[in-house]
Amino acid sequence: MITIYSARHDRHHGTAELIDGTLQPCFEMPRRAEIILARVRDVGLGEVVEPGAFGLDPVRRVHTAPFVEFLSQAWTDWTAQGRTNDALPLVWPVPSVRHDRVPAHIDGRLGYYSSDAGVPITAGTWEAVQSAADVALTGARTLLDGAAAAFALCRPPGHHAAAAAMGGYCYLNNAAIAAQYLRDHGAARVAVIDVDYHHGNGTQQIFYDRGDVLFVSLHADPLHEYPYFLGYGDERGTGAGDGATLNYPLPHGTPWDRYSAALDDAGAAVRAWAPDALVVSLGVDTYEHDPISQFRLTSADFPSLGRALATLRRPTLFVMEGGYAVDDLGVNAVGVLTGFEDA
């Protein structure tokens, strides 16, 4: 399996995030990608290649042009105020206020284009997130060129990024960008299955009214877990997308047997959909020792997850999302890939 990786991910390195009412070091850090890459090489998964340059047109197929422009200019606009620390949003447009005016001041735009305070913008953030999109697009191109599977080692992750909002460590939605690219280049139907502990609210929002992309997510119950406001079982899509969204909210403490039962049901839905390609939002924060998650999967379970995905028998692009038990991250993430390859 080819792995696509860009060293430019390390240009994004937030100083701190707001956790439990205090500023603490970011869980989403450059070492995450580096330790996964080391494990890819240790096990001999396959060739590691750099991404191609795709420009912003494929990004704008998923994200609004004003949002992309905001991201590309945010650091410049922030430092123009004389600030040198990370840019973080501090005010949000709740439902009772106006949404038809985009503030001119960077503080207002940071809130307008975000869903939470987990998205620090640094001097290198835009370069890193654009590079991550290129990693995902290169993975999609690899499938279109005939590969059975590819691994897009994206960082920062992407599945919480909506069409016009960043959030949850995510800026551009790498998995959605890849899925759209596959659609635009010959795949009549694409399925996205999200196995991250947290619901892929951004991906759901992007495709919610679409009948050509199936979105399936297994995740912690949003009644008790981020992102709180999407991911419930009664969210099934709207308009042409009615029935093309399928959510499996699971309780804290979920072990492999309960998780795998939901995965079996999700797999049946994907088979019935009969997609031309499958995109997997690969989060391994379902791990029992993950510091910000509450499931109970063990390292031995992740190859089983990969084997289950392999039974779908579709060209498959794995797009890296979450996982914050950094010391075990390489073993767990690559365990999914080796399980898939060995099936």
Image: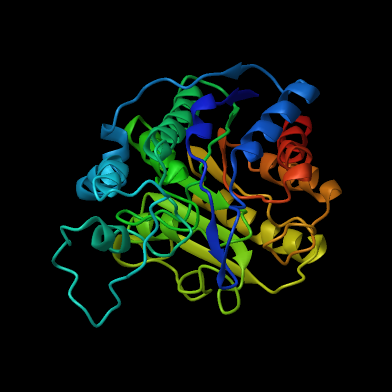
Nearest the viewer among 84 and 168 is 84
Nearest the viewer among 16 and 100 is 16
Whether residue 96 can be seen here? yes
Image position, residue 282 (x, y; %): 61, 46
**Horizontal relation, residue 192 to residue 291: left or right:** left
Please give the count of numbered marks on the rendered protein: 0
Image position, residue 87 (x, y; %): 38, 52
Scheme of image coloration: rainbow
Q: Residue furthest bottom?
A: 96
Which quadrant is the C terminus positioned in?
top right
Residue displayed at 58% across by 33% down? 153
**Horizontal relation, residue 94 to residue 7: left or right:** left
Residue displayed at 44% across by 69% down? 236
Residue displayed at 39% across by 40% down? 177
Nearest the viewer among 261 and 273 is 261
Residue displayed at 61% across by 73% down? 221
**Which of the 4 image quadrants contains residue 167?**
bottom left
**Horizontal relation, residue 339 to residue 267: left or right:** right
Which quadrant is the N terminus positioned in?
top right
Q: Residue furthest right?
A: 300
Residue 95 versus residue 174 in the image, above or below:
below
**Which of the 4 image quadrants contains residue 127?**
top left
Image position, residue 74 (x, y; %): 29, 46
